[in-house]
Image (cartoon, grey):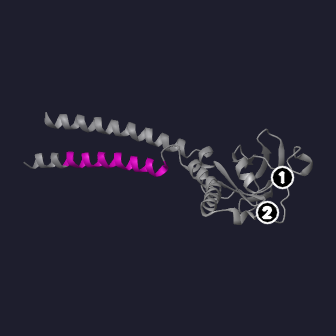
Amino acid sequence: MNHQRVDVMMRYTWTAATGVLAVLITISVICVSPAAAHRVTIFAWVDGDTVHTESKFSGGKKVHNGQVVVTDLEGARLIEGRTDENGAYSFKIPKPTAMRIELIAGMGHRGEWVITDEEVGASGITAPEGDRPPGADVPSRGSDSPSPASALGPDDIERIVDAALDRKLEPMMRLIAESRPSGPSISDIIGGIGYILGIVGLATYVHYRKQSRDRST
């Protein structure tokens, strides 16, 4: 009777383990589907009057000859180009406005990045004189006016430096946040499969060892 109970429990364990294993394998197949394996990202940052971009697939491979389309937030096209062999593409800021940078890598793979007004404004790019509203001219300073540097105290300088660092670090933080996987990683799935199989193997070993001991007695 005890052997029958053990056999029933083992069959139930194997059935449950097989079901869990099938689910895990299905999840792993979904996670490594072509669409997920070839997801592309584009990262852009402002350096002076130039925007630099880097594009890559989720596996780390650089996007070569990918199309980069730059528009304003209303959709008006500003400039476009293609990535080089290192997945890089750079361009001069064409207009002092926020920009949406879209990467088209073929086979339906797309990624985008937004350059904010603050990032563009920090570059010092201004609108052409003909586009400036009336009264937007910068007032002239007399020769006796104090220089901006002499008018700044230590606290002012610290605030300016902190603001500049925040602008430089913001794109990196956004890239890190967007790069985080939304589901279980492949290593997590494989680890789960190994854990289930390990439990089943241990239970099988204990079961047959107990059977052999009972038979010897």
Judge whether 5 appears above or below 154 on screen: above
Q: Main secondary structure of the magenta part?
A: helix
Asked whether, in this view, residue 160 is left or right of residue 145, the answer is left
Q: Left or right? Give the position of 193 relative to 47.
A: left
Residue of label 1: 94
**Type of amino acid under label 1:** Pro
Q: Nearer the viewer, residue 94 or 9?
A: 94
**Dividing the picture into quarters, in which one does residue 52 lie?**
bottom right
Check disc 2 and give the amino acid type: Ser
Q: Distance from label 1 to label 2 (Cα)?
A: 33 Å
| For discs 1 and 2, the disc positioned in front in the rendered view | 2
Check if residue 192 falls in the magenta segment. Answer: yes
Which of the numbered marks, if any, corresponds to residue 145?
A: 2
Q: Position of residue 110 (x, y in %)?
A: 70, 45
Depth order, front residue of 74/81: 74
Would you call the spot at circle 2 few (<14 residues within 10 Å), some (14-19), or many (20 or more)? Answer: few
Upstream in sequence: badge 1 or badge 2: 1
